[in-house]
């Protein structure tokens, strides 16, 4: 969402107080999955020698560093000495340019690439690594898909003996090369080679512009040998261009990291390696990256949402709730009565540990009440719930509710994370009308939210503090134009934010 011009200045000041919420301190974000952190050597901006750079990586909190191969004997010797002095590890080497050339139409280029990968395999063994990342060829107008696929397969088969000899595995990476665009195809390619020395180096961020990484994880399954960690924003991609989508910090883009780590748990990827491949920098910058990775790998994940009607007899008609004086709208166990909204780009909606969790969407995720909705009161009632912001930087609760023959939304934490108010009054949204106020919202903290609708007024409270008390007589009450319409008559949504909800109830006045 874009702030109105009137709000840009106050929000800029507020942002200074809230931007730190995304990243808990290391003491609260221990890596609970045993996944070891590496980074690409080129990310280390400080230090002159390999030793100095590795010392910085270690101070930042990384356990390993990956280099581009082939390296040459002198560089292998220098790196080996630095590893012994720092105690860091080379999990593997990267065959970027050679890997891309494995599918080249030119025989000479392809043969040289095969020789370079063989050398990189030997160097990885010398440095104590276990894999060589293989850039998985390329397709363009002069290198047709079927031909590139065939040449890639032939080149990989030619390399398997060297992999066996060295004991180093080759892990193909999903990249923007117009080849292996589906996880099904990637899995089939690995299986066709039928070798324990061939697997996949899954890059979480590289598939986000056209897919969902958690889907790739479950398809690739045991074929995943290592992970590359980066972020991607579909929103920035749409506004500024494809490559600009990578210009966002970890956990601040379109990836639903809890869903990703849950998928990794499901395929039992634990104790392996994950390598950062993002914009590098000095010690402070690298430390921030390492801490964000620890936060990701300490996330609880998200269980799969139950299928509609699961557990009920086939064809059984859902029992309507009898909305009495006070009615609970959420049982803390199932999505009974609620339906995930198909915004397009929405995150996962699940129930876990008594809470309704909505994943980070691109940009919206939400649920709508669809059980006995015709019985919902239109005035003379109060809705209450508790909401918690987990990850994100915009509204974590947009509660849409009936107002006579129309609807309105109570926005909590909008326009950069601080705006609270009612959308819309006389065509003006919560950032523009007199209900607007500005609050700081912490992550991992429950907030009690209450909205009351009477014939003449809309009132709203957060933690028993009245924030809205507006007379709606002779006012036009409506929803903000756009996808929020899908939340009517009663719904909850978030904007690029992961959130939790509980204790949802409706009380007739």
Image (tube, rainbow, N blue to C red):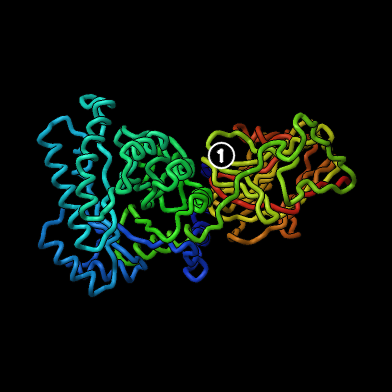
Q: Residue at x 16, y 43 (%)?
A: 114
Between 227 and 122, which is closer to the camera in this rendering? 122
In percent of width and height, residue 234 lies at: 44, 39
Q: How many marks?
A: 1
Query: Residue furthest toward the bottom?
Result: 85
- Judge from the rendering whether residue 365 lies leftward or rightward of residue 129; answer left or right: right
Secondary structure of residue under mark 1: loop
Image quadrant of residue 492? top right
> Where in the figure is residue 146, as x and y percent of width and height?
28, 26
In the rendered image, the vertical position of residue 380 relative to residue 388, given as above or below: above
Whether residue 142 is visible = yes
Residue 255 in the image: state x and y as whole percent: 47, 46
Residue 411, percent from left and from top:
65, 46
Which residue is painted at 26% across and 35% down in the image?
A: 153
Q: Residues within 10 Å of mark 1 (few under 14, many from 20)?
A: many
Q: On screen, 121 above or below 55?
A: above
Location of residue 286 by image quarter: bottom left
Q: Residue at x 42, y 48 (%)?
A: 222
Specify whether residue 8 is in view: no
Up-down relation of residue 446 to residue 412 (above or below):
below
Q: Which residue is mark 1?
A: 346
Name the residue rendered at 26%, 43% in the picture: 135
């Amino acid at each position: 969402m874009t702030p109105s011009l009137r709000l840009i200045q106050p929000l800029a000041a507020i942002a200074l107080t809230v931007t730190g919420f995304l990243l808990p301190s290391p003491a609260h974000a221990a890596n609970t999955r045993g996944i070891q952190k590496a980074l690409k050597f080129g990310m280390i901006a400080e230090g002159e020698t390999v030793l100095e750079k590795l010392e910085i990586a270690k101070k930042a909190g990384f356990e390993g560093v990956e280099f581009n191969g082939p390296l040459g004997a002198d560089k292998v010797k220098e790196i080996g000495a630095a590893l012994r002095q720092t105690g860091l590890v080379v999990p593997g080497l990267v065959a970027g340019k050679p890997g891309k050339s494995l599918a080249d139409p030119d025989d000479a280029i392809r043969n040289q690439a095969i020789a370079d990968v063989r050398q990189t395999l030997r160097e990885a063994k010398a440095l104590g690594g276990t894999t060589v990342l293989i850039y998985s060829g390329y397709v363009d107008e002069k290198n047709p898909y079927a031909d590139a696929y065939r040449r890639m397969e032939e080149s990989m088969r030619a390399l398997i003996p060297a992999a066996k000899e060295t004991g180093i595995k080759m892990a193909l990476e999903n990249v923007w090369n117009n080849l292996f665009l589906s996880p099904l195809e990637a899995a089939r390619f690995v299986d066709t080679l039928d070798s324990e020395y061939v697997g996949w180096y899954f890059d979480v961020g590289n598939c986000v512009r056209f897919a969902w990484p958690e889907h790739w994880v479950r398809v690739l399954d045991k074929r995943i040998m290592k992970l590359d960690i980066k972020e991607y924003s579909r929103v920035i991609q749409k506004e500024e261009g494809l490559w600009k989508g990578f210009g966002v910090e970890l956990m601040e883009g379109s990836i639903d990291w809890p869903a990703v780590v849950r998928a990794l748990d499901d395929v039992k990827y634990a104790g392996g390696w994950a390598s950062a491949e993002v914009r590098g920098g000095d010690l402070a910058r690298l430390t921030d990256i390492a801490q964000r990775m620890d936060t990701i790998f300490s996330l609880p994940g998200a269980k799969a949402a139950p299928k509609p009607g699961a557990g009920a007899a086939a064809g059984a008609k859902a029992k309507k709730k009898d909305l009495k004086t006070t009615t609970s709208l959420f049982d803390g166990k199932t999505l009974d009565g609620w339906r995930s909204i198909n915004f397009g780009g929405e995150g996962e909606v699940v129930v876990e540990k008594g809470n309704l969790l909505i994943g980070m969407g691109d940009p919206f995720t939400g649920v709508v009440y669809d059980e006995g909705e015709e019985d919902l009161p239109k005035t003379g009632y109060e809705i209450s719930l508790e909401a918690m912001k987990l990850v994100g930087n915009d509204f974590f609760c947009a509660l849409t509710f009936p107002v006579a023959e129309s609807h309105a939304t109570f926005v909590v934490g909008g326009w950069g994370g601080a705006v609270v108010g009612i959308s819309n009054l006389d065509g003006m949204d919560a950032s523009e009308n007199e209900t607007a106020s500005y609050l700081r919202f912490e992550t991992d903290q429950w907030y009690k939210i209450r909205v009351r609708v009477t014939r003449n007024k809309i009132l709203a409270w957060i933690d028993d503090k009245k924030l809205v008390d507006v007379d709606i007589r002779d006012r036009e009450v409506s929803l903000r134009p756009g996808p929020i319409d899908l939340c009517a008559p009663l719904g909850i949504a978030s904007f690029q934010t992961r959130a939790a909800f509980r204790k949802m109830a409706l009380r007739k006045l």
